[in-house]
């Protein structure tokens, strides 16, 4: 097993999210969910969170923001980025035979079927494109996984919370208190989140999307916040309102997958028009 990439494919994390938050029991109390989940979790996912929780420090996040948020690595259109992400498919993964594009189209088509606004459909199409960080050489624990604030105490609702004890920030005098380096209800715009595909894609796309879409992209992996109601002491009133949209998006993220393959070529013209409605022909990545 690769120490930096203990899961065979990033989609394993999403598969385990579906186990942790199955639709029929999504309103259960978090303590029972986490106990049940940890009892049956795959060793590869446990190892993934061990690495994630040990190395996602304030300094690590600052380093990654400096490394990637200059957005000078590539210039690609959105569909081109989807095709690039498609090369991430692991044929040895027994959990799915669908490509990354097919996963994205399934989410977008479910949103479209339910009659949501066009920008909402677009979020379904693009929400995981930040995973191209894996193709830029980033380890999976720095690309996928539940996200959380850094620079303050780690919520006990975060899965495998015990692994944070190996994190250098655990006992830091400034980073280990409830508010850490932040003020009460400072607002998430002023809070550094752990590094991953959500934060990266938010910065790539934020200038072209409504604020509701920005929140969906930036916080869709922030399960401690939008599913466990953690970190409410940092939320502003604006965050509280906009997280209703994050919660609306979550079921499409988790439960839209099926064995029925979308017809990519027949759907492509609709989605190319949708992409062109919001984005220029090339984006900086």
Image (cartoon, rainbow, N blue to C red):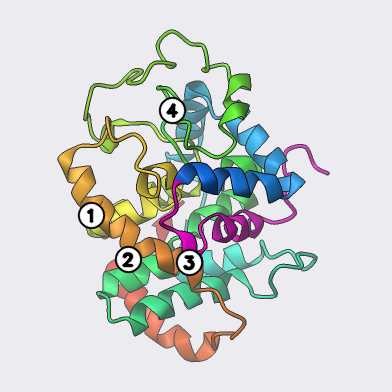
Q: Nearer the viewer, residue 208 or 221?
A: 221
- Contact check, label 4 and label 3, Cβ < 8 Å: no
Q: Nearer the viewer, residue 138 or 178?
A: 178
Question: Marks 4 and 1: which is nearer the front?
Answer: 4
Is residue 25 inside the magenta stretch?
A: yes
x, y percent for residue 218: 37, 49
Question: Marks 4 and 2: which is nearer the front?
Answer: 4
Q: Secondary structure at mark 4?
A: loop
Q: Nearer the viewer, residue 13 or 136?
A: 13
Name the N-terminal-most of marks 4 and 1: 4
Name the N-terminal-most of marks 4 and 2: 4
The CA distance from mark 4 to mark 1 is 23 Å
Number of numbered discs on residues: 4
Crowdedness of circle 3 by 10 Å Cα count: few (<14), some, many (20+)?
A: few
Q: Quadrant of residue 89?
A: bottom right
The CA distance from mark 2 to mark 3 is 37 Å
* In this rendering, position of residue 175 left or right of residue 21: left
In the image, the segment drawn in magenta is 1-29
Image point (73%, 50%), residue name: 42
What residue would you read off at disc 3? 24
x, y percent for residue 10: 64, 55
């Amino acid at each position: 097993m690769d120490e930096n990439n203990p899961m065979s494919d990033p989609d394993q994390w999403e598969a385990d999210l579906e186990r942790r938050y199955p639709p029929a029991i999504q309103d259960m109390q978090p303590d029972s969910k986490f106990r049940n989940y940890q009892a049956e979790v795959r060793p590869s996912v446990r190892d993934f969170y061990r690495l994630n929780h040990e190395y996602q420090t304030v300094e690590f996040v600052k380093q990654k923001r400096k490394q990637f948020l200059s957005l000078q690595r590539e210039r690609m259109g959105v569909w081109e980025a989807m095709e690039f992400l498609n090369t991430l498919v692991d044929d040895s993964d027994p959990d799915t035979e669908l490509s990354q594009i097919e996963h994205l189209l399934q989410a977008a088509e479910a949103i479209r079927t339910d009659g949501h606004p066009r920008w909402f459909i677009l979020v379904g199409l693009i929400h995981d494109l930040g995973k191209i960080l894996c193709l830029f050489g980033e380890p999976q624990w720095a690309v996928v996984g539940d996200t959380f604030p850094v620079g303050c105490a780690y919520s006990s609702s975060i899965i495998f919370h015990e692994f944070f004890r190996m994190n250098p920030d655990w006992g830091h005098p400034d980073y280990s208190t409830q508010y850490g380096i932040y003020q009460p209800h400072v607002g998430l715009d002023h809070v550094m989140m752990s590094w991953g595909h959500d934060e990266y894609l938010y910065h790539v796309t934020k200038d072209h999307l409504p604020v509701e879409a920005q929140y969906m992209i930036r916080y869709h992996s922030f399960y401690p916040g939008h599913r466990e109601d953690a970190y409410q002491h940092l939320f502003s009133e604006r965050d509280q309102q906009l997280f209703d949209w994050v919660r609306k998006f979550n079921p499409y993220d988790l439960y839209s997958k099926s064995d029925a393959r979308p017809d990519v070529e027949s759907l492509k013209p609709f989605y190319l028009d949708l992409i062109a409605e919001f984005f220029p022909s090339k984006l900086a990545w």
